[in-house]
Image (cartoon, grey):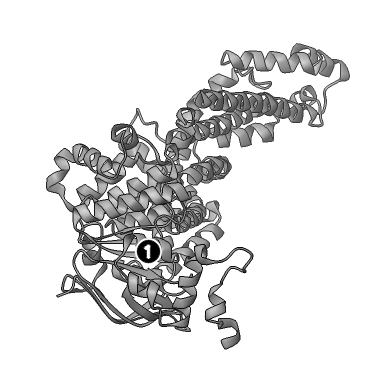
Amino acid sequence: MSLLEVSDLTVSFGRRRRVAVDHASFSLEAGQRLGIIGESGSGKTVTALSVMGLLPETAQVAGSVRLAGRELVGLPESQHARLRGDLVSMVFQEPMTALDPTMQVGRQVAEVLRLHAPERSGRARQHVLEMLGRVGLTDAERVADSFPHQLSGGQRQRCLLAMALINSPDLVICDEPTTALDVTVQARVLALLDEVLSAEGAACLFISHDLAVVSQVCSDVLVMLDGDIVEAGPVAKLFTAPEHPYTRGLVATARIDQVRPGERLPTVEDFYPRAEAR
Amino acid sequence: MPVLAFLGRRLAIFAISLVGASMLIFAVCSALPGEVAEIILGEGASQAQIEALTAELGLDRPPVVRYLEWVGGMLHGDFGVSYFTGQSVSGLMAPRIAVTLWLVLFALLLSVAVALPVGMLAAMKRRSWQGFAATAVAQLGMAVPAFWAAIVLVLVFAVGLRWLPANGYIPLTTDPVSWAAHLVLPVTSLAIVQSAVLVRYVRSAFIEVLSEDYYRTARAVGWRPFPALLRHGLRNAALSLVTVVGLQLASVLVGAIVIEQVFALPGLGSQLLSAVSQRDLMIVQGVVMFLAASVLLINFLVDLSYAWIDPRLRTEAER
């Protein structure tokens, strides 16, 4: 049995039922890292939020999402909340605003522990410091006692990672976790993510619009376009033999090192002319 | 230390506003037409009598001198003496301050206690009938004048059901139970409008919180919607809400004047009204100054509370 099995997932919004994800099916094994790549509005974040059960009220969900054998579509909020932060956790894009500005980050991390593992909360502080150390925050004591505004973007993203990992979830969903960071910080956070995911043995659903970033973390990748999964397979195969024209465009734009000087940079539209197609 | 600088700035604003308010109040009271002595002596008084009384009351001296004397006295707790009875204004005000204080304090507390849960519900359920109902009831509450609410409450609970006294006031030290019973209806009538207004602010403050990334994070780590809002939204929403509550104080005080009249409460409001009708300007000046100072003080405290609520203000120095 796969850890995560998504079959025929369809999500639509509002009264006019605008479809954001259209009959998507994929699965994820324990410890596997799967990237979802696509542009804004392709349905990748909506897919992730359906697993988390955090879609807005206006969303209508059909199909099936099974996590560790448990059906999540139609699961009551009280039961879904118990899984979040424990069995499955999520790291979001905006580290600058994702932490409560009025609370020390140490307390925010400790809270996740108390919510799901009250038996470990007696030594919460120690667990928190340990976890902060594991995500590469060297002065964990000082960070734990800091408010978010006293930390850098990279430090905040590490704190969010600590919150996501402290209960050793089976699945960590990362939604563009490094997009808002400086490029140098981005590389370090990605390396760290790779390292802690391996150490924890957690599976990962990694959402990005950047094929280069996905290839650093994931072994497999899904390409989403307008709510459809247009291509899926190992990252290496996608790079060497992309099938869908949109994927070929993505690969070309990710390999600007192969562009000869003076030549125009490739765009996805060179391969998949969407505007004309419609 | 940015916190000290912040406090210093707020304290300066508080002091300047106090001086400004006192000048304005004094100027308005002095500019009112009609000689005080003439009013006291009545229509038959001769010019000589009026001049003699004006001199006796010290009203022939230049306004600046009288202003400084008035302000100087207030710094020592002396609000001057009534032109009519010769009694000390502070002595007249003292027993009435408690009445108004209880009325305003409980009305504010009650409106916050009602508006907070209702506003949060209205924000969370804004797309369903519960949220719509909460907003509609708040809209209705805003349209109800406090005096009308008071009359209806009296008719129902005092005249009809005979559960509560219709008017009057018993000091807390005399009989605590009776004191509380006499305050229930006035406090409720004053709080209805205030809580209705506050519900709208609470609702919009929490709707903002619901769209914040930290709320989504709280949900993602396993908080259910309402606890997430309480745990991580309350403090953030409080930043804008304390401002509103501070500003509401002024309208609660105005409302209290009316409500004291309806319930025959011997508070500052009824004293102010009777002093105005008697043209006892020393009392008017004193009461208005006291009310203005209270509003300014509360708003100063609201400013201070930002530093307590928002760590960004407290800890900026360590950055």
Secondary structure category for the residue under label 1 = helix
Q: With A128 as the anchor, is A160 left or right in this view?
A: right
Which chain does the numbered disc 1 sit on?
A
The picture places residue B307, in percent across and down from the top left corner, at 47, 33
Corner quadrant of residue B255: top right
The picture places residue A254, in percent across and down from the top left corner, at 47, 66
Camera-nearest residue between B190 and B125: B125
The picture places residue A97, in percent across and down from the top left corner, at 44, 50
- Disc 1 marks which amino acid? Val
Query: Can residue B99 be spotted in the picture?
Result: no
Query: Can residue A144 be spotted in the picture?
Result: yes
Corner quadrant of residue A68: bottom left
Camera-nearest residue between B91 and A79: A79
Q: With B272 as the anchor, is A44 left or right in this view?
A: left
Q: In this rendering, is residue B99 above or below A43?
A: above
Q: With B50 as the anchor, is B245 left or right in this view?
A: left
- Residue depicted at 37% across the width and 35% down the height: A146
Q: Residue furthest left?
A: A119
Q: In this rendering, is residue A177 above or below B317?
A: below
The picture places residue B79, in percent across and down from the top left corner, at 61, 19
**Mark 1 crowdedness (10 Å alpha carbons): few <14, some 14-19, many ≥20:** many
Please count the marks in the image. 1
Q: Residue furthest front?
A: A260
Q: Which residue is under mark 1?
A: A214
Q: Residue furthest right?
A: B47
Q: In this rendering, is residue A77 above or below A18?
A: above
Corner quadrant of residue A212: bottom left
Q: With A209 as the anchor, is B274 left or right in this view?
A: right
- Residue depicted at 47% across the width and 53% down the height: A180
- Residue depicted at 29% across the width and 45% down the height: A135
Camera-nearest residue between A29 and A216: A216
